[in-house]
Image: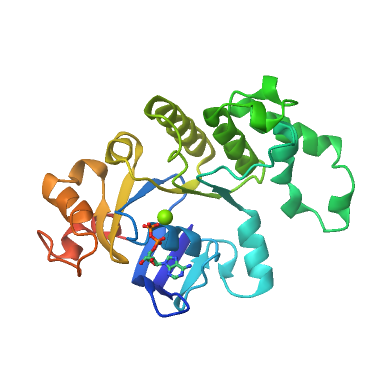
Amino acid sequence: MIELKDVSITYPGGAVGLHPTSLRFRQGEFTILLGSSGAGKSTLLRSLNFLNRPSAGSIDVEGIGRLGDRRSLHRHRRQTGMIFQGHQLIERLSALQNVLMGRLGYHSALRSLFPLARSEQRIALECLERVGLAHKALERVDRLSGGQQQRVGIARALAQRPKLMLADEPVASLDPATSQRVLSLLQTICREDGLATVISLHQVELAQAFADRVIALAHGRVIFDGQPDQLTPQLLDAIYNHAGHAPAPIAAPVPTFNLNSVGE
Ligand SMILES: Nc1ncnc2c1ncn2[C@@H]1O[C@H](COP(=O)(O)OP(=O)(O)O)[C@@H](O)[C@H]1O
Ligand SMILES: [Mg+2]
């Protein structure tokens, strides 16, 4: 669905967020990014909708082609749902109004000044229904619980009718039980809709419970790409215990773990 070829990202000032990385994300695949703080999870995730523009390399999207000009970016971003850690809802608006924001990419700036049509409201309501919150449609989001707010965030992303779903630490501020429920809901929806999904998390147990594929990063490089049951204690040690040091040798060279690229 989306393919990175030798994408690297260097921040102004010279910090390298991502060393040259080639990856492909497929429709219907639920991918979780792991890595300690500063490993490059957000950098990689944000490159997938060009919030971080690659310093080198290229990104191709099925049905759109190479990302770069305004038109390709607009089309790609419209079909890319993004869920944030702090959900980034507008607190004084209702759940329904927040979800309607997800529809704005489909309308011109001028058109967006007017109330959105009934058909739009229907789409938004359907999305709230899918996350189990139709009954809260008219409630202000600041009156909802943290878990409910994140479900509104999911509904807003769904209202875009996305093909790609990105989430940067979507459950970081939720308790463990709520985190489980939110991830399970995301997984169900993404499976049903066949979305390519990429989520960064810091909880290994959640990755093991939900991911089809885990990509682990350290120091801006992919050090594991495979199925969650292939994550050995040694690998987890390499992922989490080398933060702050120069890239340390891991148990085996990277290509050994690059199981998802076999046959692609
Ligand atoms: N806006 C930025 N400006 C400069 N350096 C940045 C910026 N964002 C991230 N970095 C650096 O890029 C590296 C990767 O960061 P990030 O992708 O945020 O990691 P993670 O999400 O895994 O915690 C870190 O070394 C971080 O300091
Ligand atoms: Mg991050």
Residue drawn where x is 20% and y is 66% of the image:
245
217 in relation to 87, above or below: below
Residue 17, picture quadrant:
bottom left
Residue 263 appears left or right of 25: left
Residue drawn where x is 74% and y is 32% of the image:
94
* Image position, residue 40 (x, y; %): 36, 62
Ligand 2 sits in which quadrant?
bottom left
Residue drawn where x is 47% and y is 31% of the image:
182
Q: Nearer the viewer, residue 255 or 101?
A: 101
Q: How many marks?
A: 0
219 in relation to 27, above or below: below
Residue 255 appears left or right of 198: left
Residue drawn where x is 12% and y is 66% of the image:
249
* Image position, residue 44 (x, y; %): 42, 62
Q: Residue furthest top?
A: 135
* Image position, residue 185 (x, y; %): 48, 30
Q: Nearer the viewer, residue 167 or 193?
A: 167
Residue 39, picture quadrant:
bottom left
- How does the figure colour the protein chain or chains? rainbow
Residue 45, picture quadrant:
bottom left
* Image position, residue 201 (x, y; %): 37, 45
257 in relation to 227, above or below: below
